[in-house]
Amino acid sequence: FFVRKRKRETSFLAMSVTLHTNYGDIKVELHCEQCPLASENFLALCASGYYDGTTFHRNVKGFIVQGGDPTGSGYGGKSIWGKAFPDEVRDSLKHTRRGILSMANSGPNTNGSQFFFSYVKCSHLNGLNTVFGHIIDGIDVLDMMEKTPVDEKYRPLKPIVFQRCTIHANPIAEDAV
């Protein structure tokens, strides 16, 4: 017997997820209201374990660290819809500082599962990549990631592993008793 509850009064602006890595934990706040597609995709992939055990395959000091590709090649990964989804570029959300979370893409409206954290302000990416979150705790972990030595293709010599994640509130889940 299931009874439908009224929708929770949870503010999407306060949604957060902790990425547990082999370097430590990074807690991010998601911009679910401004970027519902990117946020839903990220939350659903996190909840399903899609990212568990994947590596951050690209690490460019003074720029970004990129992950979310289950193949580890930088060419793989799919959205929860099985195809690319549109950009959600917002004037209010820009690459203004260290710790911004954005969708990685290969051109307009090609978002899948890959994402990146900025190491610096990246104004040249504004209008090109969907900013859908930012780090609220664990910037020291991002510091350690940036210091990781890489090869000539910017692949970390010591793997940076997204071990699992914790969703602190999930606006996508149905309320049922």
Image (cartoon, rainbow, N blue to C red):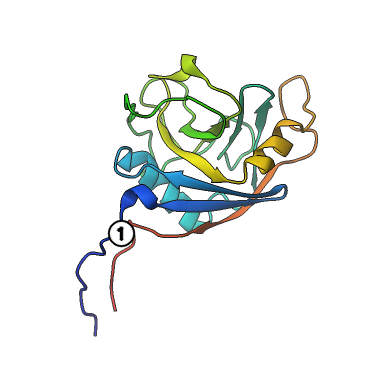
Residue 92 on image: x %, y %: 33, 28
Front residue (pair 84, 10): 10
For residue 153, say whether it is visible. yes
Per the image, the residue denoted by label 1 is 10
Residue, x 41% and y 60% (percent of image)? 169
* Residue in view at x 66 percent, y 34 percent: 57
Instruction: Name the outermost residue toward the bottom.
Output: 1
**Residue positioned 28% across, 74% down in the render:** 176
Q: Would you identify the image quadrant in which residue 38 lies?
A: top left
Could you tell whether 114 is left or right of 24 in the image?
Answer: left
Amino acid on which the number 1 mark rests in the picture? Thr
Q: Position of residue 76 (x, y in %)?
A: 54, 35
In the figure, 51 relative to 147: above or below?
below
With respect to residue 12, does 34 lie above or below?
above
Q: In which quadrant of the rendered view does residue 35 lie?
A: top left
Q: Is residue 80 visible?
A: no
Q: In the depicted view, which residue is nearer to us: 93 or 163?
A: 93
Q: x, y percentage for residue 137? A: 57, 47
Circle 1 sits in a helix, a strand or a loop, which is it? loop
Q: Pointer 1: residues within 10 angstroms few (<14), some, or many (20+)?
A: few
**Residue 124 horizontal/vertical position (percent):** 48, 14
| Total numbered circles | 1
The answer to whether 140 appears left or right of 32 in the picture is right
Q: Residue at x 60, y 55 (%)?
A: 164
Q: Which quadrant of the figure contains the N terminus? A: bottom left
Q: Quadrant of the C terminus?
A: bottom left
Left or right: 40 in relation to 98: left
